[in-house]
Amino acid sequence: MNEIIEMIRAPWPWYTSGAIIAGVMFVLIFFGKSFGFSSNFRTICAMSGGGKQCEFFDFHWRNQIWNLLFLVGTILGGIIAGTLLSNGSAVEISEATLADLSALGIAAPEGMQPKEIFSWEALTSASGWIMLVLGGFLVGFGSRYGGGCTSGHAISGLSTMQLPSLVAVIGFFIGGLFTTFVLLPFILA
């Protein structure tokens, strides 16, 4: 029994999640559903009566209950993975990435995330607030302006061969590269 538990706690191959995502997308497409995580915010606002204040939130939100269950499942899955399935070891990162992080003043993570970015001390710094507030605003604004989030466009949109999703995904990658190589070094300097 201990061997089975250790096998479950060991890092899983990358293709495991790919196969699960493909299976979920097949089921969603079969039932005529589209997936997107940012749409949960709209659903929660509509459930809370936001449709009385704003036309955007005035829609039949009960059709999106399944997506809220996905949100709850994601949170519970993260808790289960972090507590029951974790073997306590740090995330394995390539030497090249560790060298790049070191050049930015970020030490190798001792757990899941580098403390220089993801800690209470980082939150109280100017760079931490820039990343939290400005980053949060840009993610929210971009999701609304782009008609969806990375998961909606990259997973659901590309699965159904939508050209706007392809354009959005290309934009995500360009924005990610710009942020990684231009903005992040500037913010952490």
Image: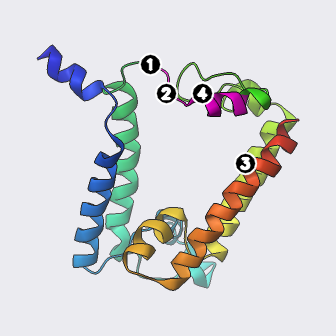
Q: Determine which of the numbered discs, if any, sits on residue 92 in the image.
A: 2
User: Considering the image in quadrants, where does the N terminus appear?
Assistant: top left
Say which element carries label 1: loop
* Residue placed under numbered mark 3 in the picture: 180
Of pointers 3 and 1, the one earlier in the residue sequence: 1
Q: Mark 4 points at which residue?
A: 95
Is residue 92 one of those drawn in magenta? yes
Question: Which residue lies most toward the left here?
Answer: 1
**x and y, in percent, of residue 169 in the image:** 56, 69
Residue 115 rendering spot, x and y as whole percentages: 67, 25
Q: What is the secondary structure assignment of the residue under circle 2?
A: loop
Q: What stretch is highlighted in magenta?
A: 90-101
- First in sequence, mark 4 or 3: give its number: 4
Badge 1 amino acid? Ser
Q: Residue 89 carries which label?
A: 1
For the C terminus, which image quadrant? top right
Looking at the image, residue 96 sits to the left or right of residue 49; the answer is: right
Who comes first in sequence, dot 2 or dot 3?
2
Categorize mark 2 by other alpha carbons within 10 Å: few (<14), some (14-19), many (20+): few
Relative side of 59 to 80, left or right: right
Density class for disc 4 (Cα within 10 Å; few <14, some 14-19, many ≥20) is: few
